[in-house]
Image (cartoon, rainbow, N blue to C red):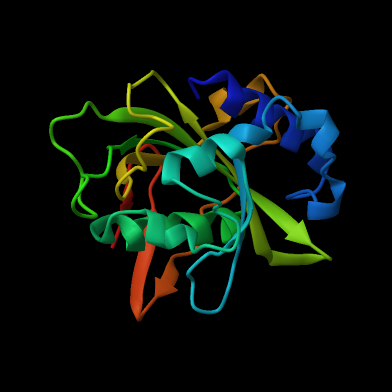
Amino acid sequence: MRHSISKDLYAYWDRLRGARAAPDRNDIDPAAIRHLLADCFIVEIDQACLLPLRLSGTRLNALWGGEGRGAPFLGMWREADQRELAAAVLTVIDGATPIVGGVKARARAADSEEADPSRRALDLELLLLPLRHFGKTRSRVLGSLSPLGEVDWFGRVPAAKIEIVSLRTMNAREREGFGARPERPPFPPVEIGGRRFIVYEGGKARA
């Protein structure tokens, strides 16, 4: 993890879970992470795997140009990356393992939904963490999407579909500083639309 938002959110999540695989949604105290909320989101795991947003921070709303709550998180990503993102989210909840990644956002063109090639891309860090909800394990994912730089269009122009650059599970060394538990056994593949996906250590999700 590179961004302080990711590090602080992970540390808070790790303290909440204690000896459990994941904390419950009701354990989260918004006041305790007030300084993180603008970059945070919570997605629901639904049958259609559209991943509706149940929480969308103000800076994320600025990124996609409106209130994100209730919108499908999956639809905010490039079509070419949607299966990979869905596989990563399902891996997070099935394997109870955090995933961190690098993504790129580009300003939307004025006359289309496509990216404006004349504007500089914004690099962001994505963090995905499992959450229980009323005792259910396959229910919610807590995440953050934190800018790693600045661009002149942010907050003025909505982003086009976001692009995945890399996704990987957090390794044991990264988690040592948070008092993390030992590595879990490898997690099983997940199925989306009849296709099987695995997220490999240190790499992107692959079919």
Locate residue 113 relative to residue 25 in the image: left or right.
left
Locate residue 28 relative to residue 77 in the image: left or right.
right
Q: Which residue is drawn at 58% across and 28% down?
A: 6
Locate residue 7 relative to residue 207 in the image: left or right.
right
Q: Residue at x 39, y 30 (%)?
A: 154
Locate residue 175 relative to residue 28 in the image: left or right.
left
Q: If the image is split into quadrants, where does the C terminus sit?
A: bottom left
Which x, y percent locates residue 88? 45, 54
Q: Is residue 105 among the parts visible in the rendering?
A: yes
Q: Is residue 86 among the parts visible in the rendering?
A: no
Q: Which residue is drawn at 52% across and 40% down?
A: 60
Q: In which quarter of the image is residue 95?
A: bottom right
Which x, y percent locates residue 1? 50, 25
Comparing 162 with 71, the one in front is 71
Total numbered badges shown on the rendered structure: 0
Q: Which residue is drawn at 31% across and 50% down?
A: 161
Q: In this view, does 151 lie above or below 172?
A: above
Q: Is residue 62 above or below residue 189?
A: above
As drawn, which residue projects farthest toward the left?
A: 118
Q: In which quarter of the image is residue 157?
A: top left
Comparing 69 with 24, the one in front is 69
Comparing 27 with 189, the one in front is 27
Q: Quadrant of residue 151?
A: top left
